[in-house]
Image (tube, grey):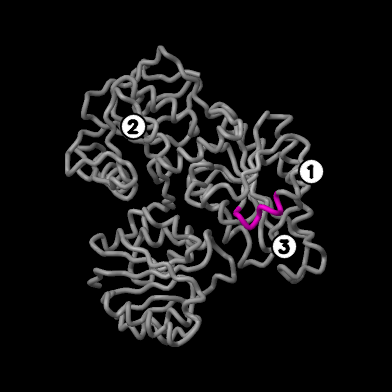
Amino acid sequence: MNIKKIIIFRTDRIGDLLLTMPAVSALKQRFPGSKITMVISSQTKDLVGSNPDVDDVIVLDGARMRGLKEIFIFAKSLRKERFDLAVVFNPSKSFNLAIFLAGIPNRLGWDRKWPFLLTNRVKDEKSKGEKHEIEYNLDLVRSIGVAPGAISIFVPETDQSRLRIKNLLQENGISDTDDLIAMHPFSTNPAKLWPMDRFAAAADILYKTKGVRVLLIGDTESVKKSRGIRHIFEHEIIDLTGKIALEDLPSLFKRSRLLISNDSGPMHIAAAVGTPVVAIFGRNLPGVGPKRWGPHGRGHIILHKDPGCKVCEDNRCPIDYRCMKDITVQDVVDASLEIMEREDQKKVIYRDTLKPVKGKRGNLSAICISEIGWRGMRRLSLDMANHGIDVGVYIKGRVEEDVIDIITRHNRIRLYAIERHLFKPVLMREFFKRRFFGGLKWIITSKKRGWIDISARALRLKALHIVEAEDGYKLINYDGAKIEPGTLWGK
């Protein structure tokens, strides 16, 4: 396929959009020179604007496509752009008709809602809920020969977002050393609501046992609800409902130890930035359960009870949502403590006497850290930076932007920031082919996100893997040979 311009439709909610982005990334990797335009809703536009896989955005809410006149006008505008491929992830008669009238030669979508207007269609079996939503979306692009690589979800974060969150927390009496837990107890669907008094009880227990500060978050529509429940919290809760824009949530979640949430968009944002989630799920319809819609990635705990309903009536439940009420306060507390204790065990205790691997200016040490937790990773990376090593951090298929942000502020080093979709193919594919790096040329990234920009400059690259050992954390290379004892980060 000679594809130069792609238009992608995903106009529903936050979670739907985020769980589509791995498929968008796969399309970009399959057609690297193509221009990708995404049609999204106004609710989700802040999650796409600076995504490196997306070149342009069209904001289109459903109300604007209800009549034939609007569809014809939209199709006319698409025809002018001369797209080669259209992909409709959320089935829509209006979208299928529009891309047909626009004369787009390759039209991909599900076999629902006038599928005869498509040139390529895939059987829609999502209602079975047999796999994750990400995999269903990848199945759609696999049908045209797109082979996805490592799965990751890019969520934009800016210096301005980090500053706004820092200032907001300071205004509410939160210091940089306070441990935070975020709670998102709201939903417009009663079948997704865990009782509010149980959120409060769990928050109080976690405050008593771990001394954590609890943040209550929600959108502007949840402000009235939050005002009505503050009194049920025994200890102080920081109510940030309606005070945090969608684009600032990634920065808040990176600052939090975990998120406790109903099935929601913020749950998927937290998972995307690597923050562990205690996800509370109800409903026993396969197509809406946690196997399909749970938080993506490792380290999360999903709470889901089956009350034995023969048929789930969803938001018309005749037994007062027993599936949600069967989840106890202790269930949520135990899950939260398990996550926090797991992260505590992975911490690296900082020492001034450490002797990290020596590097020369202009060398890039890529640290693949999978077992020490993000706080340990920050300390370890900063210590290496203090010793003059340029550091890029690769973790679980993405660049750890929080660490890069810390290191770029450090005056003693120059950081060569590596963008996710450029870094991943080089590190993962080429390294295992040759077992070494002769150099690294793909290091260009966008200035819009505050990265340092380097044009086609080759750098020596040393790849290190950090693992836990009995006497501390050892730096080990990929063929298993241990490095000198001086490179041991002890407990």
| Residue name at image x 47 percent, y 19 percent | 350
Identify the residue under disc 3.
190
Residue 101 lies, in percent from the top left, at 35, 86
| Magenta region | 219-226
What amino acid type should be assigned to the residue bearing mark 2? Answer: Thr
Seen from the viewer's position, the closer of residues 487 and 201 is 201
Residue 265 lies, in percent from the top left, at 56, 56
Residue 243 lies, in percent from the top left, at 58, 47
Identify the residue under disc 2.
408
Is residue 348 at all visible to an observer of this figure? yes
Answer few, some or many: residues within 10 Å of disc 2's Cα (few below 14, many 20 plus, some between 14 and 19): many
Left or right of 263 on screen, residue 385: left
Residue 469 lies, in percent from the top left, at 48, 24
Seen from the viewer's position, the closer of residues 475 and 411 is 411
The mark total stands at 3
Task: Give the secondary structure at mark 3.
Answer: helix
Separation of marks 1 and 3 at Cα, in angstroms: 20 Å
| Residue 232, label in figure | 1
Quarter in which the N terminus is drawn: bottom left
| Residue name at image x 50 percent, y 43 percent | 274
In this rendering, the label closer to the viewer, 1 or 3: 1
In this rendering, the label closer to the viewer, 2 or 1: 1
Q: Is residue 335 above or below residue 79?
A: above
Seen from the viewer's position, the closer of residues 307 and 449 is 449
Is residue 312 at all visible to an observer of this figure? no
Task: Give the secondary structure at mark 1.
Answer: helix
Say whether disc 3 or disc 2 marks the residue closer to the N-terminus: 3
Q: Is residue 275 above or below residue 43?
A: above
What amino acid type should be assigned to the residue bearing mark 3? Answer: Pro
- Residue closest to the far right: 319
